[in-house]
Image (tube, grey):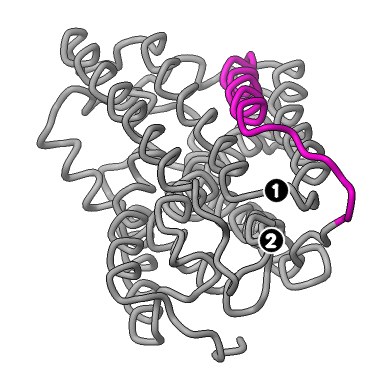
Amino acid sequence: MTGQLERAPRRTRVIGVVCLLFGAPVFAELIQSYLDITGKLGGTLFLIAFMAPLYGGVALLIREVAVRTGRGWPGRLLLAGAFGVLMPTWVDLSLWIPQSAKEIELWGDIRGVTIAGTSVLALSSWALGHVVMSVATPLAVVEGLLPNGRGRPWLGWFGITVLTVLAVGVAALIHFDEEGPDAQVSVANYAFSLALATALAIAAFTRLGRPLTPVEGRRTASPLLLGIAGFVLMFVFDLAPASWVGLVLVWGPPLAAGVLLVRCAPSPEWTPRHPVAFAFGVILERALIGFLVPTPPGADAGGKLVQNIVVLLLVLALGLLLRARTRDPVPELEPHAAQ
């Protein structure tokens, strides 16, 4: 790490850390309203607080490493991919659970698309879901809200150490939860997933993880079109069936998004509003599709509807705030920051 960058103003750092800590679990777990605590305020607040050090902490640590080592968004996404792989294979072990204790619809079908005994559909959809909703989207949103913090470290070494310890601690609590469903996992399973996560993390520190090089004269799509693209691609991802065709549809949107953003981001016309618009399209789709998600076992249909409406209104308000906060030019400290 360079350690030479000036940290963001104190107020910006505090707001950024708090928003990312508690915003990441909201984006990752609550917007779709699929949990059995849906509609229950106490359970929802507990989940946010409990998962904040894991989801929000990892997002903050990925951001800090990327900023201090000159990684661009490609590097952030590769590190997020490593986290996404470890979540269902080492933390909650969901990839190795034959049957959901909560009888999640299509659980068996999702795990049925396998290669060499590993459910590639489950691993793909859950890992990519964490990349998008646990790390990338909250990062784009919070940085969009805080223009003074772009390209600057938010944490000192003490904060990095505390968040690392807390994130590992929460992960351990989830992993060793005796009340959780029994997982059927072998040493080979652990080794495979750890090797995959390690490869993704190492790739983040190669040329693949560097910021995209600006290309003079290249045009970019408008923020509106990027927002629509984010919405449509997330819609396709969420509606992918539990089948081999679904596996193709799960990978299609992130690959298409990668091609689109790699094509658009190097443009001199690219501003912080562009990635924020794409991220907002993703969030809006998740808020709306939550209305279509069946009421989870143990949840109340009326409470779920209320939560869906409240979430949608909050997302729309967030969109207005993001639009206002991304009008300013990119600070000189971080040229072409969105890459």
Q: Nearer the viewer, residue 45 or 125?
A: 45
Residue at position x 46%, y 31% from top?
283
- How many angstroms separate mark 2 from mark 1 (CA)? 7 Å
Q: Quadrant of the N terminus?
A: bottom right
Between 309 and 325, the residue placed more toward the observer is 325
Residue beneath the point at 56% across and 36% down: 277
Q: Which residues are magenta?
A: 215-241
Q: Is residue 41 above or below residue 184?
A: above
Residue 6 in the image: state x and y as whole percent.
Answer: 48, 85
Residue shown at 75% from the left, 19% from the top: 244
Residue matched to label 2: 336
Residue 270 is labelled as: 1
Q: Which residue is farthest left?
A: 42
- Residues packed near mark 1 inside 10 Å, few (<14), some (14 to 19) or many (20 plus): many
Disc sitting over residue 188 in the figure: none
Residue 107 x, y percent position in the rendering? 50, 22
Residue 240: say if magenta.
yes
| Quadrant showing the C terminus | bottom right
Q: Is residue 89 magenta?
A: no
Whether the residues at callouts 2 and 1 have beta carbons within 8 Å, the answer is yes
Q: Residue furthest front?
A: 328
**Callout 1: helix, strand or loop?**
loop
Q: Position of residue 208 (x, y in %)?
A: 81, 63
